[in-house]
């Protein structure tokens, strides 16, 4: 009879504080993804606040992905009050979202994941052996920061996206600065992508459900229908009919299942490309072909490679969008609107996957209901299922090898624990 208990406390190189516990006894394996951040109950802080305060508050939920939280909240509030914005505003928001995605993916892939495969404990240790690579990574991060600074007003916690558009009118010079940063970024990320794409990931697959936005011939970030790989789709405002939260005593975060089937699912870059890989840029497609990356993929470790391909795709997409804006007369000024009672839901793609913001406002524009579903919260149950199966597949491995594999698995999911940990045993 094999009895095995692996408890990995305070997993490093992830955002936030998290443990993973896996116990095997008599052939039965249990796993617990324990989110250990303190109770924050962010939605409760929003009740009674005026609508224009919400984006500033929710973007502080996370220092890694504040851009998409602000944009998701702005879109949900616009839908609650029936506000329409121009195509030019949508395009600029898309570029800003891309900047945020690239900021996050660079940090995850090169500071958190890469040291696992190079035998280093951190990117600082890696820099001693490969300073050229680390300098290139830091330069790419700075270029992504520039996009956020120009269009968002800050590298972290942007301030310009507001209900109806942006809080400022961008000059041609500012758009050209953003374009120049995006152009250099596209070149640099094509070179850096191979570093991740050539890594040999652990041999492991487990087919699951993958949820992501779909919208035309695009890999969308801000709009789309929520689709389930293998069949089924629903609109953002229908999410409560399809996603069910589970409260676990061992975690400070909600966990989620697909309500109709009662099964876990995965969101994130892998889910996005499992759905939308035909719409990757030509360069990203060629890189995938060169390094043998195929979609759909059922290995959670390929989330790393999907992120590397997204870096290339989205940098090139930002260049396209900015060039189109500079060559057109698209209106990017704010839209006028009247504050009114209403309810709105926005489904977007955060770097880590599907993100939902839902608000109800009273006639004075004050929040009377708020609900935010983060990607990491949705991934916990799928991470646990993968951890259980990984231990079964590697039954002959020693504890040290298992610990290493499980750490790589957790990091492949790119968890943002502090974003997820807001509901403590709340029913």
Image (cartoon, helix red, strand yellow):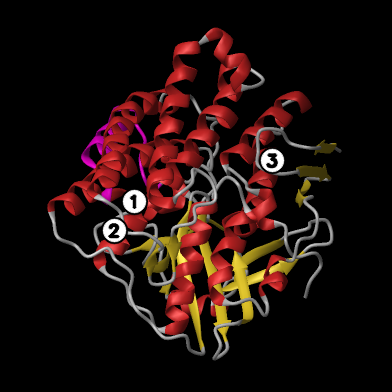
Q: Nearer the viewer, mark 1 or mark 3?
A: 1
**Which mark, by number, is residue 91?**
2
Element type where label 3 sits in the image: helix
Are the two marked residues, 2 and 3, in contact with CB atoms closer than 8 angstroms?
Answer: no
Spot the residue most to the top.
129
Q: Are marks 2 and 1 in contact (CB under 8 Å)?
A: yes
Image position, residue 82 (x, y; %): 39, 83
Position of the N terminus, as image quadrant, is top right
Q: Is residue 49 left or right of residue 222?
A: right
Where's the C terminus, which quadrant? bottom right
- Return the x and y of residue 420 as percentages of the image width and height: 67, 57
Rendered residue at 28%/56% (across/down)? 218
The residue identified by callout 3 is 392
Q: Which residues are magenta?
A: 279-296
Q: Does the segment drawn in magenta span residue 337?
A: no
- Name the one closer to the observer, 427 or 389: 427
Residue 273 in sight: no
Ranked by sequence position, the earlier of labels 2 and 3 is 2
Q: Which residue is mark 1?
A: 95
Quick one: 64 or 181, which is closer to the camera?
181
Residue 405 versus residue 261 in the image, above or below: above
Q: Position of residue 224 (x, y in %)?
A: 36, 67
Residue 145 got which mark?
none
Alpha carbon separation for disc pair 2 and 1: 6 Å
The residue positioned 51% from the left and 60% from the top of the image is 70
Estimate the x, y position of residue 384 in percent, counting from the top left: 68, 50
Quadrant for residue 336, please give it: bottom left
Instruction: Select label 2 or label 3 by which is in front.
Output: 2
Report if residue 284 lies within the magenta region.
yes
Distance from disc 1 to disc 3, alpha carbons, whole Å, reads: 43 Å
Mark 1 element type: helix
């Amino acid at each position: 009879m094999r009895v095995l208990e692996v408890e990995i406390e305070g997993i490093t190189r992830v955002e936030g504080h998290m443990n993973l516990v896996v116990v095997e006894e008599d052939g039965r394996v249990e796993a617990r993804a324990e989110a250990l951040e303190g109770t924050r109950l962010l939605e409760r802080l929003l009740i009674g606040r005026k609508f224009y305060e919400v984006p500033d508050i929710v973007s502080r939920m996370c220092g890694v992905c504040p851009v998409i939280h602000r944009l998701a909240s702005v879109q949900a509030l616009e839908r609650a009050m029936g506000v329409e914005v121009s195509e030019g505003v949508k395009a600029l928001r898309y570029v800003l979202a891309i900047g945020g995605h690239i900021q996050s993916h660079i940090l995850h892939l090169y500071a958190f994941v890469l040291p696992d495969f190079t035998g280093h404990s951190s990117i600082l240790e890696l820099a001693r052996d490969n300073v050229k690579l680390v300098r290139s990574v830091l330069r790419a991060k700075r270029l992504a920061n520039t996009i956020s600074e120009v269009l968002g007003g800050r590298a972290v916690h942007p301030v310009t996206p507001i209900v109806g558009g942006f809080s400022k009118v961008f000059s041609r010079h500012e758009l050209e600065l953003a374009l120049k940063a995006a152009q250099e970024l596209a070149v640099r990320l094509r070179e850096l992508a191979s570093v991740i794409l050539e890594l040999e990931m652990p041999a492991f697959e487990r087919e699951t459900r993958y949820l992501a936005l779909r919208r035309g011939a695009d890999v969308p970030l801000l709009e789309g229908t929520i689709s389930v790989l293998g069949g089924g789709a629903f609109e953002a405002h229908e999410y409560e009919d399809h996603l069910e939260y589970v409260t676990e005593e061992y975690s400070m975060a909600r966990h989620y299942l697909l309500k109709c089937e009662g099964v876990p699912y995965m969101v994130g870059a892998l889910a996005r490309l499992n759905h939308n890989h035909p719409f990757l840029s030509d360069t990203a497609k060629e890189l995938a072909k060169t390094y043998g990356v195929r979609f759909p993929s059922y290995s959670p470790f390929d989330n790393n490679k999907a992120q590397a391909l997204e870096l290339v795709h989205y940098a090139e997409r930002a260049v396209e969008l900015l060039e189109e804006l500079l060559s057109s007369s698209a209106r990017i000024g704010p839209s006028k609107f009247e504050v009114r009672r209403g309810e709105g839901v926005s489904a977007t793609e955060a770097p880590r996957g599907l993100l939902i913001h839902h608000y109800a406002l009273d006639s004075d524009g004050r929040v009377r209901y708020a609900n935010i579903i983060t990607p990491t919260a949705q991934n916990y149950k799928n991470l646990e299922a993968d951890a259980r199966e990984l231990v079964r597949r590697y039954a002959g491995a020693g504890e040290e090898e298992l610990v290493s594999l499980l750490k790589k698995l957790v990091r492949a999911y790119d968890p943002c624990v502090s974003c997820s940990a807001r509901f403590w045993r709340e029913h």
